[in-house]
Image (spheres, grey):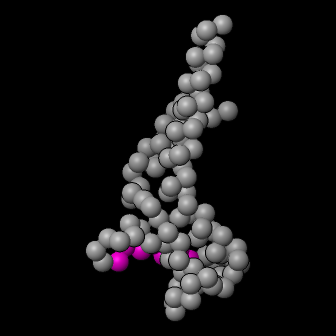
């Protein structure tokens, strides 16, 4: 079970991160002519990008690579997904509390 303190810690980390949306731009899907990256604040004046490098057994993993693309998608989507999941956990906990207090 996720404790209230753990949920609060996750919520603080999400709130401290750069606001979204974040968008994954992968070399294999977009052919951007360089490295895959996560765009932070699309539409902002100037580039705001997060680059992530992955190494397996000392060798850099580069696109095209389906696992690497999935990792970029996951990281970018987490910026939008985590706050929504936190809100849903809070909503469900409140519903359970209301149900329990009415019994």
Residue 74 is drawn in which quadrant?
bottom right
Which residue is rendered at x = 58% and y = 16% of the image?
Answer: 98
The magenta segment is 47-53
The rendered magenta stretch, by its main secondary structure, is classed as: loop
Q: Is residue 51 magenta?
A: yes
Tell me: 46 left or right of 1: left
* 40 is higher (above) or lower (below) than 101: below
The percent coordinates of residue 62 (x first, y second) are: 63, 84
Which residue is rendered at x = 51% and y = 88% of the image?
Answer: 32
The percent coordinates of residue 88 (x first, y second) are: 57, 38
* 92 is higher (above) or lower (below) than 78: above
Q: Quadrant of the N terminus?
A: top right
* 18 is higher (above) or lower (below) than 94: below
Which residue is rendered at x = 65% and y = 75% of the image?
Answer: 68
Q: Quadrant of the C terminus?
A: top right
Q: Is residue 67 visible?
A: yes
- The number of numbered discs placed on residues in the rendered structure image is 0
In the image, 49 versus 101, the foreground residue is: 101
Q: Is residue 16 magenta?
A: no
């Amino acid at each position: 079970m996720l404790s209230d303190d753990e949920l609060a810690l996750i919520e603080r980390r999400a709130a401290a991160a750069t606001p979204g949306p974040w968008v994954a731009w992968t070399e294999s899907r977009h052919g951007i002519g360089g490295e895959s990256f996560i765009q932070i604040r699309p539409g902002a004046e100037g580039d705001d990008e997060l680059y992530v490098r992955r190494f397996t057994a000392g060798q850099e993993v580069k696109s095209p690579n389906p696992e690497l693309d999935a990792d970029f998608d996951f990281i970018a989507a987490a910026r939008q997904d985590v706050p929504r999941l936190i809100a849903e956990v809070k909503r469900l906990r409140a519903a359970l509390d209301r149900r329990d207090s009415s019994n």
